[in-house]
Amino acid sequence: MASVRETLRVPKGPVDLEEIDPRGTPVGPTRKAAAADEMADLGVRLDTLQEALYAEGTGGGTRAVLLVLQGMDTSGKGGVIHHAVGLVNPQGVQIASFKRPTAEELAHDFLWRIRKQVPVPGRIGVFDRSHYEDVLVARVDSLVPEEVWQARYAQITAFEQELTGRGVTLVKCMLHISPQEQAERLLARLDDPTKRWKYNPGDLDTRAKWPAYQEAYEAALERCDADAAPWYVIPSDRKWYRNWAVAAILAETLEDMAPVFPPPDFDVEEQRALVRVSLR
Amino acid sequence: MASVRETLRVPKGPVDLEEIDPRGTPVGPTRKAAAADEMADLGVRLDTLQEALYAEGTGGGTRAVLLVLQGMDTSGKGGVIHHAVGLVNPQGVQIASFKRPTAEELAHDFLWRIRKQVPVPGRIGVFDRSHYEDVLVARVDSLVPEEVWQARYAQITAFEQELTGRGVTLVKCMLHISPQEQAERLLARLDDPTKRWKYNPGDLDTRAKWPAYQEAYEAALERCDADAAPWYVIPSDRKWYRNWAVAAILAETLEDMAPVFPPPDFDVEEQRALVRVSLR
């Protein structure tokens, strides 16, 4: 089987999101029940890998993972955190949600608030939205002049190179849904009183700009994809596929990193004897 | 069945930890398999409750939960976070680990670093060690003069009253293990190369002061137990019982709080119509 990463990596060259089926299952499970079985296995794999990464960090290792989640409203950024990131020990996870910037954040360069949330060694950082908002909503809504957002693609690439240079492995996932699926999810939120708090009337304004957003996503995917900081396009109209795909990409990424448990910096036999003596 | 909270609450009056069996199962499952079944149910209960608490927070609610974990080395603070806290959506959880204070932290009063980590509304905060270290290691190792640590019990009580006054429900769990069990766990860490990174030779120095630590714990349990900020003593020689007990206490606490999904601040019918129109 082709690796999940190879299959879901954004294609080289011009990106046309219309060519990628949001209901597709191009690799891995094609049914919900099969995905559930695979999630259980992924949970075991991810748990061990995360523990090794964490241990490596305590032993002086500098590596970390940064999972960047982007997608239109209802695409499932929160669902991925719940069901895919939720598979690993929460102690090893560092989640940052980027909402509309505050006045203080706007007074700094756009990467200022992002830098503060880069995961420390040994951790899996998760960005629920990210610096990409600064070339998405900022571009679509002209929050800054064009020359400003145009310059950001290169600034983002430089920033991500800096991160990978100091040991942060980036995993960037665009959760790709169709406008039909978004409408169904919005209606589902309205129907269920326990989901209404997730509904925001402002989401309809963003929805009305769907084509402009897709174009902005295409530009970000095309201009900021790099082997060291790859973009994946996750078919997300089926929640179970989306959660499986992100978990599988995380597992493959961590397996590639092959984190190692640090060797002891003490004499194991000596310590064993001391523990035994303390029992008398 | 008596509630888990009633049964595991620290007894009123003088506390004698020797009277509490670290291998006991005074309430709930008495076997590992039964505990595993109950954990699955607890996962469902906790997930719903946590989502409601989170939703309440987004709707202007001010309530939060703070789980304080204390216990001797190897008692399982990390295990509880992994297996009990790990049952809920990581997005709603805020974990803080308090290690040996830094020079900057020592330059402030002992609650300074603690205050910065109090959970925001809607979250379940978890303290892996806490302000109680300032009446545990600080007392046992005379890190500060006796009049300083003696004054801290009242300062802690006042601080916790302040927290409960602004909507933070405290759940304080002392993970109670026997010195025999600690020795076995230390040896297990030494035996397994993937566990050695958790072993710290300094733990034996702390272990050598076991009676002084038990006395310090007894004082903290006795002097800082309050109905609004209760202490629970969790029999922790059996890991499955410990994880179950903390998860069950969390669930009972959240059920008591009865968080509510906020009502919509928009017209549901109107929004439904707008979504439907956007589909044409």
Image: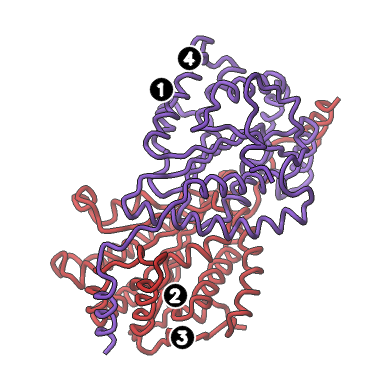
Chain colours: A red, B purple
Estimate the spatial distance between the alpha carbons at disc 2 and disc 4, rounded to whole Å: 56 Å
Q: Amino acid at mark 2?
A: Tyr
> Residue, x 68% and y 30% (percent of image)?
B203
Q: Which residue is mark 1?
A: B109
Residue A275 vertical position relative to residue A3 in the rendered view, above or below: above
Residue A233 vertical position relative to residue A269 in the rendered view, above or below: below
Q: Percent position (x, y) of residue A45?
A: 65, 64
Q: Percent position (x, y) of residue A119?
A: 45, 52
Q: For numbered disc 3, what is the local secondary structure?
A: loop
The mark found on residue B151 in the picture is 4
Estimate the spatial distance between the alpha carbons at disc 2 and disc 1, rounded to whole Å: 47 Å
Q: Amino acid at mark 3?
A: Arg
Q: Chain of mark 4?
A: B
Q: Which residue is mark 2?
A: A232
Depth check: A85 or A173 in front?
A85
The mark found on residue A23 in the picture is 3
Q: Nearer the viewer, mark 1 or mark 4?
A: 4
Q: Chain of mark 1?
A: B
Q: Chain of mark 2?
A: A
